[in-house]
Image (cartoon, rainbow, N blue to C red):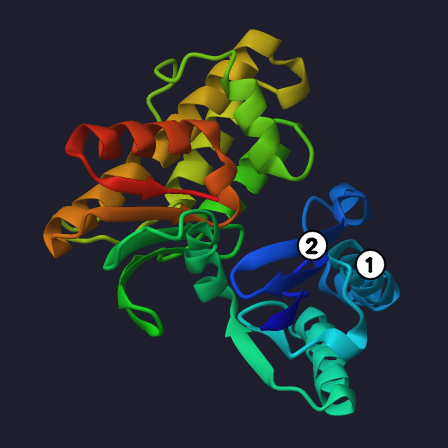
Amino acid sequence: MLILGIETSCDETAAAVLQDDTILSSVVSSQVKVHEKYGGVVPELASRHHLENIDTVLSMALEESGAGLPDLEGVAVTRGPGLVGSLLVGISVAKALAYVLRIPLAGVNHLEGHARSPFLEKRDLPLPAICLVASGGHTEIVEAREWHRYRILGSTRDDAAGEAFDKVAILLRLGYPGGPAIDRLARHGNPRAVAFPRARLEPDSLDFSFSGLKTAVRNHVKARGAAESLPEAERADVAASFQEAVVEVLAEKLLRAAEQARVSTVVLAGGVAANRALRERLGGACAAKGWAFAVP
């Protein structure tokens, strides 16, 4: 079945064409340059740029796949969660295409899309699986016994992990988006240089909390003076220590969830899945236990 996928949940306009489970094309138009001067995504600007870019992105995705609109047999679109204005653009286009072409339309949950993305590359991964979805807006541990049936085992009680990365990057004057910037700088720092707190909450809790960690970084930087005046080596130490605090808790709780559920397939997804330290920590731990590990 030839399917067109459309994604406009936040600040990237994306489209892909799939033949069954094979990705024929994938086109993404980023809005980083639009939002970086504000230190985060501005919803009104995001939705306007989706309107400007979606026709071009769709045309490029179809051209790269070698398919035309009459060839499509279905349309899938992100229906949420996400920014309302941004979602509306993609959903409106998907509805119009499905109506005109008289083909089925499927609304896809944003977080389920994250969780299932590694299975496009590793189709032999067995279920059940424990998945950590970590992004700028979400941090959740989800158990998937079978597709479309999920159980949330833990989630953040305040900030998402990706949001914490973005806010700390602003404190350190590293720009936006913060995740890649902190990841790069942390490679040159000592992850044990600053003893930032780890919020583990109740003994059996699989929930997360990053607001206290974010405050601790802010207080540390403030006590040392302006971020611009910190030596590069010291900024690297702060970035590495902050990253270690986040990675340690994310990995610890994800692995504990897998042990408690007696599941040996571990999945990492979402924007924070690009973090080198988190991938290495989870990959090494799963290999030591003989578990399957997947990340996009």
**Residue 153 x %, y %:** 24, 61
**Residue 27 x %, y %:** 73, 53
Q: Could you tell me which residue is drawn at 55 percent across and 17 percent down?
A: 235
Is disc 1 placed on a helix, strand or loop?
Answer: helix
**Residue 98 x %, y %:** 71, 85
On-image quarter of the N terminus: bottom right
The residue that disc 2 covers is 25
Q: Could you tell me which residue is drawn at 73 percent across and 91 percent down?
A: 99
Which quadrant would residue 182 be assigned to in this image? top right
Q: Is residue 131 left or right of residue 187?
A: left
Q: Residues within 10 Å of mark 2 (few under 14, many from 20)?
A: some
The residue that disc 1 covers is 63
Residue kind at label 1, given as amino acid type: Glu
Compared to residue 162, the image places residue 119 above or below, namely below
Where residue 141 is drawn, which disc sits there?
none
Is disc 2 placed on a helix, strand or loop?
Answer: strand
Comparing 259 with 76, the one in front is: 76
Compared to residue 118, the image places residue 19 above or below, namely below
